Image (spheres, rainbow, N blue to C red):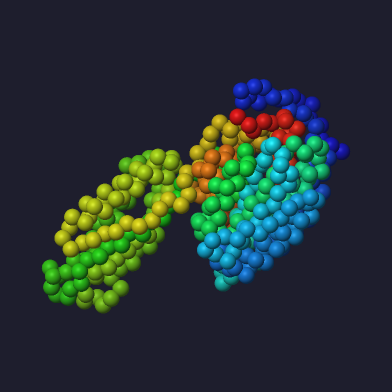
Amino acid sequence: MPIVNPRLVRVEFGWPIEFNMHIPSAISTLPQRSTELALLLESWANQNSGSNNFAGLDDMREKLRSAFASIPGISIEDIPLVGTPAQALRMRMRPTADLQILLNGHYDTVYEADHPFQICTKPDKHTLRGPGVADMKGGIVVMLAALRAFEQTSPTGNLGWEVLLTPDEETGSRASAPLFTEVATRCQFGLVFESARISGDLVHSRKGTGQFMVSCHGKAAHVAAPADGRNAVVALAAFVQAVSKLPAEIPGVLLNVVRFRGGEGASNIVPDKAEIIIDVRVTRVADQTMVLDRMQKLVALANIADGIQIELKGEFNRPPKECGPVEEFAFAAWQQAGADLSLAPFSWIHTGGGSDGSLLSAAGLPNLDGVGPVGGHLHSDREFCELPTLVERAQLTALFLHRVATGEISLLT
């Protein structure tokens, strides 16, 4: 039986909107598929698709192609990427509809073929632990289930959708980045199926991410005559001490020195080479310029020393994801859909982790991020997904799409 909620609510976004409390049966009956969805996730997570396991990525892409092909009328194409043998997967429905929504995900994981964490286990009947179950094969399961349900509702003809699944998100989305700029010209809104937080919250905003290599060249000499040399390790260590103060100087900045190499020769030689890798995360787009300018000034200051040459290389590969009025409105409608489905209340939070939602925002496409299932301990051998939330978040996505298709939710500004 369809769910009918007698309450009427209004969401403000320039004008009031009344939601129809009727829940189509294709959405209300999704819990009947809970076992099916859990088994599908387990089978996908047991398929290794580490970002550099190209054979595994090909196998995973074929599994995804086969699963999404079950949606009548869908068009599916492989998208070659420059600089990698891996391919993205694009699927579209009603591409000529006036309103287009993007559903975005990635099918690569951080677990390569030689990683010990390869097979799923179930600590209890509600939890699946395994590689990529939350980040983000669980999100793709939610996406697939939601689209199957939405396509059985009526009307659907007012809304077209596009699915974009990429194979390199975990390594920075460098090859797939142009696809986000392109898709932003076709779609008016996006849904990013990264996992929800352990609390159930979505992602309000994300820090931008960048990686930089700092190399230092000095002058080798015998340790018994240190004045004849220039110690690159000591010089670079002083630079690290200076650059580590940036988070205190610029609020919202995170900085982590993740590697320090130098002095790898004999211990009786003054080392002439050293290098570090710095991971930098910023909250605002403007922070990128501020941080880069400050680091360059510190480099210039260090290079005043006689015989020392420090060089900075790198870039911000993902800008911050900031929240705008369209996202604010969409999230209010998302929350209301959750309440109408009697789901546990949730909010949204700022997070330091990156996602392709940042690239979509930078391309001008507003989006809700973290709409996948609830999970946690990402990028570790404790990664897990709360299985009941596969159905819950699929229902939520399908109801949101249904309300957009009927005009109850307008995402056009």
Residue ID at (73%, 53%): 75
Residue ID at (67%, 40%): 100
Rendered image quadrant of residue 266: bottom left
Q: Vertical placement of 140 versus 53: above or below?
A: above
**Image quadrant containing the N terminus:** top right
Relative to 316, is 295 on the left or the right? left
Rendered location of residue 249, percent (x, y): 32, 42
Relative to 198, is 397 on the left or the right? right
Rendered location of residue 23, percent (x, y): 79, 35
Rendered location of residue 80, percent (x, y): 60, 61
Asked whether residue 395 appears in the rendered view, the answer is no
Q: Vertical placement of 403 versus 316: above or below?
A: above
Which residue sits furthest top?
15
Rendered location of residue 303, percent (x, y): 21, 56
Residue ID at (73%, 28%): 19
**Image quadrant containing the C terminus:** top right
Rendered image quadrant of residue 160: top right
Q: Nearer the viewer, residue 305 or 131?
A: 305
Rendered image quadrant of residue 47: bottom right
Residue ID at (68%, 57%): 77
Mark count:
0
Asked whether residue 238 appears in the rendered view, the answer is yes
Q: Nearer the viewer, residue 22 or 389?
A: 22
Q: Nearer the viewer, residue 236 or 360?
A: 360
Which residue sits furthest front?
96
Q: Vertical placement of 409 versus 390: above or below?
A: above
